[in-house]
Image: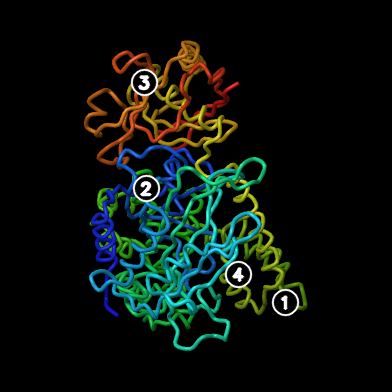
Amino acid sequence: MNRLTADELRGKYINFFVSKGHVQIQGKSLLPENDPTVLFTTAGMHPLVPYLLGEEHPAGKRLVDFQKCIRTGDIDSVGDASHLTFFEMLGNWSLGDYFKEDAIKMSFEFLTSPEWLNIPIERLGITVFQGDSDAPRDDESAEIWKSAGIPENRIAYLPKEDNWWGPAGTTGPCGPDTEMFYYIGDTPCSNDCKPGCSCGLWLEIWNDVFMQYNKNVDGEFEPLARKCVDTGMGIERTVTVLNGKSSVYDTTIFEPIIQAIEQASGSKYQGGGNTETDKSIRIVADHARSATFILGDPKAVSPSNVGAGYVLRRIIRRAVRHGRKLKAEGISLIPIAEVVVEQFKNAYPELEENCGFIMSELKKEEAKFMETLQKGEHEFEKLLPNLLKDPRKIMSGRLAFKLYDTFGFPIELTEELAAESGMTVNREEFEEAFKKHQELSRSQSGQAFKGGLGDQGEMAVKYHTATHLLHQALKLTLGDHAAQKGSNITAERLRFDFTHDSALTADQLKQIEDIVNEQIKKDLPISIETMTIEEAVKSGAIALFGEKYESQVKVYTIGFSQVDFFTKEVCGGPHVERTGSLGIFKIQKEQSSSAGVRRIRAVLR
């Protein structure tokens, strides 16, 4: 194996698929636009959902990209061999062009060809869909793999929970997938050990999804006329196997980050992740990298107590806490973030562009957390006299959880303070309360996912169109400085953030409503054109500052012609055909979102 870097893998992947007729497109923001279902972009396919669902992409039918992603569902597992909160995905896409045979053959060639990754065939394993009452067994994919050279005993048939994608909502495109695994072991865990086995010897590195069905409202799976391919290869996991390692943290990707942590803390990383020191170093490395990318994003949020800002706060504070484990007085994340910026700035120039913001926000949040720790210690001291009256000298887990939940005070620090006073903490009771807290959080997160990723329903499309009318109405009422800073759309309402320094008056809100409803009453047609971003801006189209655009973009015009229009914006769609179908626009609430940014919530009736 070799010491292939993330930059080298990224370059090889893009070059390979460009040589196969794909057009490279830009990866998108970590904070999705117009998608209420997720706080962050959690997979490479998220920004492409509208095109997988039928929209025409301006770059064509064969696409390739790399995408930054955040997932925090398994944050408590970070520190093991493979879990990360931030990761990169490589993806190639066919929008109604090639299908299973070409996709699998290209995957096999890239993985095994000496010109590309040169992975030994005997180390590869494959899983395919085993079939059920909804769809047949995917023998087609299995036969293609066998013809490419994968032996039959390295191909496993697995059920829907393992080898099926979608639909994102209750209805929509879906289909079987085939997953590619690298065998990192020497001896199988059992006679039944095969690709997809949970023993840890098989590491998934790539996934080809074949969207060939549409699940209708009756729960039936109908063949799609326009079949698509959606793939995803994890950079960190692939570099792991190419580096001949068993953990993502022992690769060229994390080497400079871990070295910076060693220098800041005086601790030494042993590798293998078997010690508490190794685990804390890994957590600091992952979380510092994640926080740097979130803060360095063009649509960056600041640490807060809600939404994506809360996730960011949790990541930073968890890193700071583990930094304290490595060094009594703790370590600053700033020098570690500087290494991340330097390491990834070529692939993601926004990190260097936003470097000042990254460092200032980290500094502020670290200081706030130290205040939180002091408050927690103070609250513990207030509880201590009553605690010492208990002859058992046991602090209830319920009280320990209250310190954690109310003040963000880590359980480990509560245990340290208790030990100093000759007490212990009922950890079992704490874990029970913490588990209930996690289940509630997952339930609330699950509720946010209902309705479908990138909802293409009738009302969501109407609200998406209404945001364009609202955006222009704000500019006409407040001035051109009132620019979109974000939006969140569901089938029940729209939420729109825009730049403005003060609260809007009742008269201004009424004027905005009247302007929007006037355009609805006019029943304006909505047309679409594809052009370069330069042509779009020259034609009068609004383009969002900081957004990365492809060389060819879609421009939606709301008006009677390309010169006689109410508003024109660069947007991926979709929209209604005429404004008259929207109904009556009503603003429900206007409030502050953050410094210099206001927020409007509105409905259509």
Q: What SS does tag 1 mark?
A: loop
Foreground: 39 or 569? 569
Q: How many other residues sit within 10 Å of disc 4, few (<14), some (14-19) or many (≥20)? A: many
**Residue at 41% in and 79% down:** 246
Res 86 → quadrant: bottom left
What's the residue type where badge 1 is placed?
Answer: Lys
Labels 4, 3: front one: 3
Foreground: 414 or 605? 605
Foreground: 242 or 566? 242
* Residue pointed to by mark 3: 567
Would you place residue 564 above or below residue 73 in this image?
A: above
Q: What SS does tag 4 mark?
A: helix
Q: CA distance from mark 3 to mark 1?
A: 69 Å
Q: What SS does tag 3 mark?
A: strand
Residue 133 is left or right of residue 208, and the answer is right
Labels 3, 1: front one: 3
